[in-house]
Every structure is written in structure tokens, then in C-alpha cells.
Image (cartoon, grey):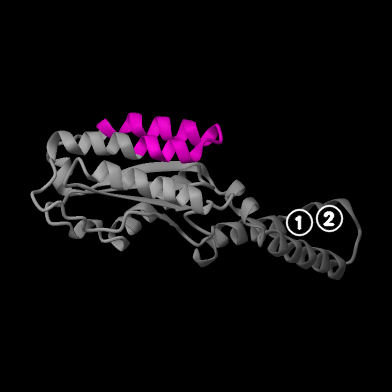
Amino acid sequence: MKPFTREEHVLIADAITSAEKTTSGEIVVVVAPSSSGYYFYALLCMALIALFVPLPLIHLTKWPIEYVYLIQLGVFALGVLAAQWRPLRVAIAPRRLKQSRAHLRAIEQFLAQDLHTTKGRTGVLIYVSVAERFAEVIADSGIYEKVQHRVWDDLIDKLTADIGRGDRVQGFVDAIGTAGKILAEHFPPGPLGEDELPNHLIVLDAAKLA
């Protein structure tokens, strides 16, 4: 994932600040290069490949079993080395697993960013996981009482389309603006205009993923 420039961070932060002026809701944007390292699944695949390597060699050659065993070890070692490359791990992971991990990471970030602690339970997370090509909006209970989850579908569809075209910053700015309009319909700004959470783009560190 191409790093966000300082100017891009500022544009997204300004969009959050502008949107939150129209509502008492809180909007947090989190981007993850990947939602999981997928190490276990990749190593499992490499182990299974190595497990089946001896079968054709035993039946189709007359090589000593020691040679076959060494080849099996070599295949597994190469597989372990290949599994160190994150794009490969993500590519071989099943789509359902990637969607599940990304959704779980989104929920974790909703809690980690304290969106569940807002006074009116009006926190909204816009979460994007690049490697999985996954985006999701998670809203707190106060919002779901008035805004159905399907209302956010158009926001996500446009955001993912913009990111796919390489226009990620405008995509985030538009998504934040749409989220602000949805929240403003049901949650007008409070009399004190409190801003409970920081207004900036949060980019997670992929190196810390298991």
C-alpha cells in the first residue's frame, strides 16, 4: 500500500472535522494494509504440499527413500521461505477467511479507538483493509436504533470503487461527507459542540499482525 502523504492526512482530517460540525456523532477512519498475517494458513498449505511430494516420487522413481525424504524437507523449507512474502500469504488465503479476519479486525478497531465510549453511543468507524479489498462501516448501538445497517451500503460501494480507481483520498473525503449527512439527519450537533475523539486518519502497522 502506498503511504499516505502529509497532505492526504490533512485532507482527510479536515473532512472529518467538517462532517462532525453538523452532528453530535463521531467519525473515525482506519486503514489497514492487511487485517491478518495469515501465517498459520500459509504454513499449513506448505506443509500439505510437502506431505504429498513423496507420493509420485515413490511410485514413479526408484530413488532411495532417503533422497525422497530430503526432497520433501527441501520443498517444505522453500515453502516456508515463500510464506514470508505477505502478498503470497494473502493470495492463497480463502476469500471467506479474509472477509472474516477483516470484519474481526474492524470490530477490534471500533473498540480500540474508543468509539463505544461516546456519550450518545454515536460513534461510526469507516474501516478499510487494503490487502483483502474489504471495507465496512461499524456504528454504535445509538445509531443502529435509528439508522439501518443497509443505509451504509452505498457509502461502502462508492468508497471501494474510488479506491479501486486509485482515487482513495477523494473516496475517503466523500465517504466521510456522506457519513456526516446520515448522522446529521438523526443526531444534530450538541449545544457545546464537543469533539470526543481525534479527527485524523489512522493507518495500522501491518508488521504487527499475526
x and y percentages locating residue 17 in the rendered image: 29, 48
Rendered image quadrant of residue 135: top left
Is 162 covered by the magenta stretch? yes
Rendered image quadrant of residue 22: top left
Residue at image mark 2 = 57
x and y percentages locating residue 112 in the rendered image: 31, 63
x and y percentages locating residue 21 in the rendered image: 22, 44
Residue at image location 56% in from the left, 49% down from the top = 93
Q: Looking at the rendered structure, which numbered label has been put on residue 61?
A: none
Residue at image location 32% in from the left, 54% down from the top = 199
Disc 2, disc 1: CB below 8 Å? yes
What element does badge 2 sit on? helix
In this rendering, the count of numbered labels is 2
Residue at image location 34% in from the left, 29% down from the top = 154
Q: Nearer the viewer, residue 208 or 3?
A: 3
Q: What residue type is labelled 2?
A: Leu
Q: Looking at the rendered structure, which numbered label has been put on residue 53?
A: 1
Q: From this viewpoint, is residue 175 visible?
A: yes
Q: What stretch is highlighted in magenta?
A: 151-175
Foreground mark, 2 or 1? 1
Q: Nearer the viewer, residue 172 or 30?
A: 172
